[in-house]
């Protein structure tokens, strides 16, 4: 047996004991024009299931609409928004294709596509759809990967033999030390008049490391010819 549908004059009147949809608040679902709220548990259960399936926030543009507000915004005379069973969800943080598929899987039946306004309307039915579908995104919301530095353990030079591996470790140590010094420069400058000597020391060590690495490569190559 489904929970009863209830109407509240203001979303603040909804008792906490009745509200079980953790990712949404009564204010999000209430009428934007009057703050009234028709609490439709079945519709909200599906909305929460959709949120759980997608794993990211649903930005609700419009949910329940009072009859007067529905008329004011030019809604359909029998709009499902007035029943509390319809939601307009922004696509700014969703792939529309994946969103539609997930919404159908959790039980939504009515779909309206509004690509120019950036949202999809979903409701409990009857099954139907209207509007122009969103253009397909070639790579929707590709994850940004920070540039990765080669791990020392994977360095081909380090896995080599002779002095080449030692040179690689030495050069890497100089590089790390330079980065640490650069990050801490703001705190060190008031204490040390000049860092030029250390800077040239690092450069000399780096050049020495390169020279040792080149020598080690040549030495290994010569050994291979023997």
Image: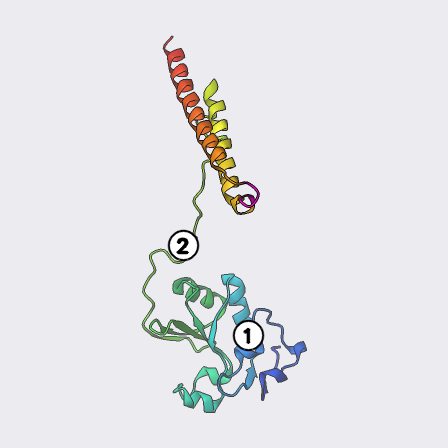
Mark drawn on residue 142: 2
Give residue 42's position: percent from left, percent from top: 56, 76
The verdict on residue 203 being magenta is: no
The residue most toward the front is: 193
Marks 1/2: CA distance?
A: 30 Å
Task: Determine the main secondary structure of the stretch shown in magenta.
Answer: loop
**Secondary structure found at label 2:** loop
Which segment is the magenta one? 188-192
Give residue 116's position: percent from left, percent from top: 33, 73
Give residue 189's position: percent from left, percent from top: 53, 44
- At a point 53% along the width and 71% down the height, the residue shown is 46
Foreground pick, 135 / 154: 154
> For this view, does 53 lie left or right of residue 112?
right
Label 1 belongs to which residue?
44
Question: What sort of colour scheme is used for the picture?
Answer: rainbow
User: Viewer-nearest of labels 1 and 2?
Assistant: 2
Q: Residues within 10 Å of mark 2 (few under 14, many from 20)?
A: few
Q: Is residue 5 visible?
A: no
The residue most toward the top is: 226
Give residue 208's position: percent from left, percent from top: 44, 24
The verdict on residue 189 being magenta is: yes
């Amino acid at each position: 047996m489904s929970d009863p549908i209830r109407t509240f004059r203001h979303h603040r009147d909804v008792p906490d004991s009745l509200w079980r949809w953790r990712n949404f608040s009564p204010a999000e679902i209430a009428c934007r024009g009057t703050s009234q709220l028709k609490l439709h548990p079945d519709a909200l259960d599906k909305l929460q299931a959709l949120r759980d399936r997608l794993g990211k926030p649903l930005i609700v543009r419009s949910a329940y609409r009072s009859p007067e507000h529905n008329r004011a915004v030019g809604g359909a005379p029998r709009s499902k928004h007035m029943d509390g069973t319809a939601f307009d969800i922004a696509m700014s943080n969703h792939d529309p294709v994946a969103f539609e598929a997930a919404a159908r899987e959790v039980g939504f039946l009515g779909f309206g596509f509004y690509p120019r306004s950036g949202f999809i309307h979903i409701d409990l039915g009857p099954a139907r759809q209207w509007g122009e579908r969103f253009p397909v995104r070639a790579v929707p919301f590709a994850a940004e990967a920070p540039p990765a530095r080669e791990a020392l353990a994977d360095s081909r030079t380090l896995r080599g033999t002779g002095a080449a591996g030692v040179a690689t470790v030495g050069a890497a140590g100089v590089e790390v030390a330079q980065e640490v010094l650069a990050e801490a420069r703001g705190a060190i400058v008031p204490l040390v008049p000049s860092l030029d000597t250390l800077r040239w020391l690092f450069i000399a060590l780096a050049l020495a490391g390169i020279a040792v690495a080149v020598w080690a490569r040549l030495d290994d190559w010569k050994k291979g010819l023997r």
